[in-house]
Amino acid sequence: MRPPDKQARVRAERYRFRPVSEDDLPLLAAWLAEPHVAEWWGDGPEASLAEIREAMDSISTEPLIVELYGKAIAYLQSYDPHLEDDHPYQDQPFGTLGLDLSIGNPRMVGIGHGSALLSQFIEELFAEGVPRVIIDPDPANARAVRAYEKAGFRAIGERTSIYGHVLLMARDAEEGEI
């Protein structure tokens, strides 16, 4: 019998999502400085880390560390655009949550973890009653767009806002399994 391929193993793995703590900040600072993260995330590692620290005390944003086999591999945050004054995605249905994702360890990029962990997390959100999940990659970030499509997201339009030019993508609960 042939062993399962790497993609099949990734799809079968379960991820753990836990709140970011002060102890995670040095790791997050290192991840934010990684070229594959820095290219797409914020205004530099210091400013981005300050935003994460602020999100730790926010009622609208939930910053999370994603673990695989007890090792931190990614930063994921969910946010409610309806709880933020003047958020550009308040036109989305009430109950919609937005996501931002960065896989920190460069060895974990490009092997299916992004779409697999998003799929697991989104199914948990849908089970809690969230009707829609959105994500907004830079349209030039082809790797992210592909991963999000594999996780069941579909493009719903391009926008330019205070966050820059983005491809707004959505996945709705009634769309079911991917």
Image: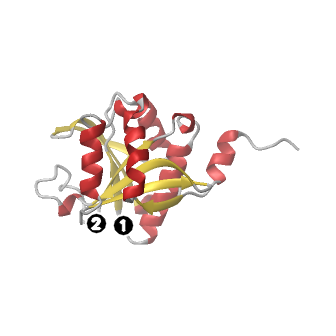
Q: Residues within 10 Å of mark 1 (few under 14, many from 20)?
A: some
Which residue is more in the foreground, 9 or 17? 17
Residue type beneath disc 1: Val
Q: Is residue 93 shown to the viewer in this render?
A: yes
Residue 37 lies, with reference to residue 88, above or below; the image says above
Q: Is residue 85 shown left or right of residue 51?
A: left
Residue 152: in sight, yes or no?
A: no
Residue under numbered circle 2? 95
Q: Position of residue 37 (x, y in %)?
A: 39, 35
Residue 87 falls left or right of residue 169: left
Q: Amino acid at mark 2?
A: Gly
How did the renderer colour the structure? secondary structure
Q: Going by the image, does 91 lie left or right of 174?
A: left
In three-dimensional space, the C-alpha distance between marks 1 and 2, rounded to whole angstroms, equals: 6 Å
- Quickly name the residue at label 1: 130
Relative depth, front residue between 172 and 138: 138
Q: Tell me if label 1 and label 2 are in contact, CB under 8 Å.
A: yes
Residue at point 66%, 53% (across, down): 12
| Quadrant in the picture for residue 13 | bottom right
Residue that extends furthest to the right in the rendered view of this protein: 1
114 relative to 8 in the view: left or right: left
- Mark 2 lies on a secondary structure that is loop
Image spot of residue 49 (x, y percent): 30, 45
The local crowd at label 2, few if under 14, some if 14 to 19, many if 20 or more residues have their Cα within 10 Å, is: some
